Image (cartoon, rainbow, N blue to C red):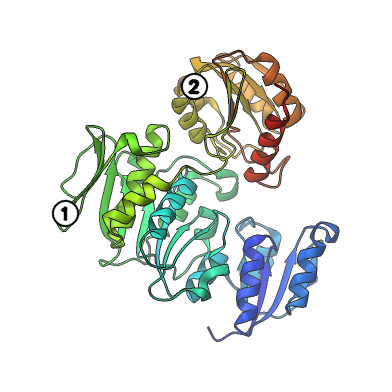
């Protein structure tokens, strides 16, 4: 790339991976984070020992350094003061995803969308693991692309989850197959509006050409409209339509009709994931896999072997006839609607956290008659109550422990207690995984 001095902003997993990748390739690295030193002492010590200069408690001192490149971790918004100052100085800013891609030698299928990214990415990665090729599943799913990029060979296959945060600061990123699952208002507090959010998603195919593929949901009008800008080969999937070339579900089967005239099918009953939304996710994943040249046998083995992803409609426990479900990954209302449709029992809903914008009234479009009561917590509790209280009885909880205790007291045999927060986790937890882990622990500690 030519330049040799970089500023990595944020020292979470993505920032650490970016710093180490650059260090391995001879760069001088400065890293900074707003986190306090006592919370990051181990990371600071490790990165310092590896050759980075690390500043915590703010970015001010790091900003005094002369650098040629800044690498942005996914959680840093573009309106942050540190980004503003770097731009004013004319510093080149890219995402950790872009950095990883520049060093990656393998072939990439990248997945984005408002909901279902993690499940689809993981399922696609499972299919790749049976392909006979070296394979990696990475991105926001937990393993940063920068952590594995320089371990890849041209034979490697990568399933990469790409968030709108990361895509906003990509430049040359070009997956061999791009997947757009759906579009709904999400992260509007971060992007500023739905149009900006959609534009970020569209960057996943902006560098693709005719030899690349875009797998997209034909059932989502916003997706269909947005994908008109693509120059890629187009491969739709649908729960409602059938295609001469595309993927669809009919007569109890998942079917992909491929451009070469071949046909793949898989029994719906053998998909170990609940709900129609997961049929759509599976159609997207198998489409991407087959377009990457993965054999039908490997695709079938991947579907058979996949049991779901933690924090997404994850059954934690059945206690006295009550099922406890961890859906902490449902960080917006559309994801909550998916859960309501998938859980066929009377529901005690635990929701709340930090609102993302757009309100909560669209939840009322779903089967809210299943919700016996909603237990609300976090910053958005008042807003959720205001939007839903005409239809749903609500209670307040100070924290997750109180919410779980209340739900346990209210639930009767045949009910489901569903953690589906409808919100981001950052007001009370490090991330959605931390929130789900706390819920899971508290549920497992409940006495019989």
Residue 43 appears in the figure: yes
Which label lies toward us, 2 or 1? Answer: 1
Q: Callout 1: 10 Å neighbours few (<14), some, many (20+)?
A: few
358 vs 175: above or below: above
* N-terminal label among 2 and 1: 1
**Residue carrying label 1:** 262
* Front residue of this view, candidates 349 and 72: 349
Residue 183 x %, y %: 42, 43
188 vs 14: above or below: above
Residue at image location 82% in from the left, 58% down from the top: 36
Q: Callout 2: 10 Å neighbours few (<14), some, many (20+)?
A: some
Q: Which mark is residue 364?
A: 2
User: Do the numbered discs 2 and 1 sit on residues whose CB atoms are within 8 Å?
Assistant: no
Residue 297 x %, y %: 29, 54
335 vs 104: above or below: above
- Residue 12: quadrant of the picture: bottom right
Q: Secondary structure at mark 1?
A: loop
Spatial CA distance of label 2 from label 1 is 42 Å
């Amino acid at each position: 790339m030519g330049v040799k001095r970089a500023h990595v902003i944020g020292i979470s997993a993505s920032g650490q991976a970016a710093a180490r990748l650059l260090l391995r390739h001879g760069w001088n690295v400065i890293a900074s984070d707003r986190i306090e030193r006592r919370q990051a002492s181990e990371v600071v010590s490790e990165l310092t020992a590896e050759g980075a200069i690390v500043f915590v408690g703010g970015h001010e001192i790091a900003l005094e350094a002369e650098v040629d490149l800044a690498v942005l971790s996914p959680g840093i918004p573009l309106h942050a003061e540190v980004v503003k100052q770097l731009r004013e100085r004319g510093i080149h800013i890219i995402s950790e995803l872009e950095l990883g891609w520049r060093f990656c030698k393998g072939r990439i299928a990248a997945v984005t969308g408002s909901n279902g990214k993690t499940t689809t990415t993981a399922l696609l990665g499972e299919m790749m693991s049976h392909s006979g090729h070296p394979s990696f599943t990475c991105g926001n799913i937990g393993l940063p692309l920068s952590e594995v990029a320089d371990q890849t060979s041209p034979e490697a296959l990568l399933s990469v989850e790409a968030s709108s945060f990361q895509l906003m600061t990509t430049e040359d990123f070009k997956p061999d197959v791009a997947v757009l699952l759906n579009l709904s208002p999400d992260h509007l507090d971060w992007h500023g509006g739905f149009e900006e959010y959609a534009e970020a998603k569209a960057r996943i195919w902006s560098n693709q050409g005719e030899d690349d593929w875009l797998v997209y949901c034909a059932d989502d009008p916003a997706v269909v409209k947005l994908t008109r800008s693509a120059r890629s080969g187009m491969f739709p999937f649908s729960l409602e339509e059938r295609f001469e070339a595309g993927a669809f579900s009919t007569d109890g089967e998942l079917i992909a009709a491929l451009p070469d005239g071949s046909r793949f099918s898989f029994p719906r009953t053998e998909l170990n994931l609940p709900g129609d939304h997961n049929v759509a996710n599976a159609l997207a994943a198998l489409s991407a896999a087959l377009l990457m040249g993965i054999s039908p046998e490997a695709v079938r083995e991947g579907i058979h072997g996949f049991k779901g992803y933690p924090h997404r409609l994850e059954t934690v426990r059945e206690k006295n006839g009550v099922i406890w479900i961890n859906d902490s990954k449902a960080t917006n209302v559309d994801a909550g609607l998916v859960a309501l449709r998938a859980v066929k029992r009377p529901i005690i809903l635990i929701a709340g956290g930090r609102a993302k914008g757009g309100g909560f009234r669209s939840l009322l479009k779903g089967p809210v008659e299943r919700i016996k009561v909603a237990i609300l917590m976090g910053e958005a509790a008042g807003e959720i109550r205001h939007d839903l209280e005409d239809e749903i009885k609500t209670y307040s909880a100070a924290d997750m422990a109180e919410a779980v205790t209340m739900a346990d007291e209210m639930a009767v045999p045949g009910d489901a207690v569903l953690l589906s927060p409808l919100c981001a986790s950052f007001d009370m937890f490090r991330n959605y995984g931390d929130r789900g882990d706390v819920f899971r622990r508290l549920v497992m500690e409940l006495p019989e």
